[in-house]
Amino acid sequence: MTPQPPPPRPGPAPPAEPRLVSGEAVELDVRVARVGSRALALMIDIVVQAAIALVLFAAATLVIDPVRPRTDAAVQGALITVGMVLVLVGYPVCAETLSRGRTLGKLALGLRVVRDDGGPIGFRHALTRALVSVAVEWPGLVLPPLTWVASLATMLGHPRGKRLGDVAAGTIVIHERTPAGWGWIPGMPPPLVQWARTLDLTGLDDDLALAVRHFLARGHELAEPARSRLGHALAAEVAAATTPPPPPGVPGWAYLAAVLAERHRRAAQRLARVRAATATLWPGLVSPPPDPARAAAPAPPEAWGSPRPAGVAGAGPERGSSRPAGGAGADPDWPREPWPTPPWLGGNGAHPDWTGMRPPPVASALRRAVPSEQQTDG
């Protein structure tokens, strides 16, 4: 028997990405600006600095021309040096100090310079960043090509995207503008509550559920017929991954909303059970668990009957639709009319029946191909 080599010893774990923690030990959720956005901001600042340089040159010409015979090359060189200092150092220092970390380029891109602890920068930080930038970054008076490469490598390799000036000044550049939030998502349709309890969601993976969530939240931003094709494709994928099939006559968007709401309800129940078990072992670790009955309750009817956000929801009954039986009597707030319109249509929109998993008969499966006069009269 040959001796087996010892198993390799696990190496040190890769260092986690550093987090931004304020001076009060509060973790801040910010987005660090990377090379792309900072390069665009620098280009805008270079254009602004060129405009300032032209203005200073024109003003100096008007002042020097009358006394040019009495000036020598040293005076002209001194004026050029003063102008370069004002443009390359004075502009970023004044802008970042007065606006708390923003130049015109950063303002246009939604960026801001802050300290490593998230606080606003001062004159010292702005001056340090500007001097390092002029010396070794842009324009880089010391070995320009080599220092440009070193600065770019520092920004690409640093976990917070810092350049040499940020390293010296103890600052970072962050995004002030936050990404767009989720749109309004319809909750559980009350007529589908009992059917949704019987769903087998083991085949519905996270990626497909996230795609459905995106579609329901941002469907109003999509144009036809791409929206109808995407909705039909998502409904077909969900139907292939879940059982039982949806009841007949259910609109496709309501079917997707019911599946997503049921998945969220079951996830909330699992979380409540885990928190309850953890609380029995270590009561001080977690807050009191939520009421399971409240977690299992369906979405409140006001998500369907109340006014929705502007530009997202529609209202009113739909022509040619059928409502499943057994869902209206239990909830007096549920509208007495047939199924409401999808969240992205107006009162005249007719919904498709995606439950049959048939291709849309027309280019738009959400609006039927009938003349506008007939839609209005209906």
Image: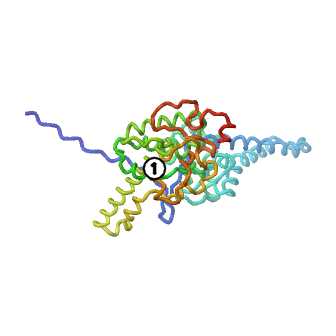
Report the amino acid beneath label 1: Ala
Q: Residue at x 79, y 41 (%)?
A: 54
Q: Nearer the viewer, residue 193 or 82?
A: 193
In which quarter of the view is residue 238 placed? top left
Is residue 143 shown to the viewer in this render? no
Image x and y of residue 4, in percent = 14, 37
Residue nearest the observer in this picture, 363 or 320:
320
**Does residue 106 appear in this view?**
yes
Rendered view: 13 above or below 371: below
- Residue 370 lies, with reference to residue 291, above or below; the image says above
Residue 300 vs residue 13, the one in the foreground: 300
Residue at 39% x, 36% y is: 240
Where does residue 99 sit, x and y in percent of width and height? 68, 56
Tell me the crowding category of disc 1: few under 14, some 14 to 19, or many 20 or more residues within 10 angstroms, Cα based. few
Locate residue 351, reporting x and y percent. Answer: 55, 40
Task: Check the image and name the residue furthest to the right.
Answer: 66
Q: Residue reaching furthest bottom? A: 284
376 to 308, vertically: above or below: above
In the displayed structure, would residue 270 be above or below residue 355?
A: below
As helix, strand or loop, the secondary structure at mark 1 comes to loop
Q: Find disc 1 in the rendering and name its residue.
A: 325
* Left or right position of 309 against 19: right
Number of labelled discs? 1
> Toward the viewer: 184 or 139?
184
Picture coordinates of residue 198 (x, y %)? 35, 48
Where is residue 274, by image quadrant? bottom left
The quarter of the picture where the C terminus appears is: top right
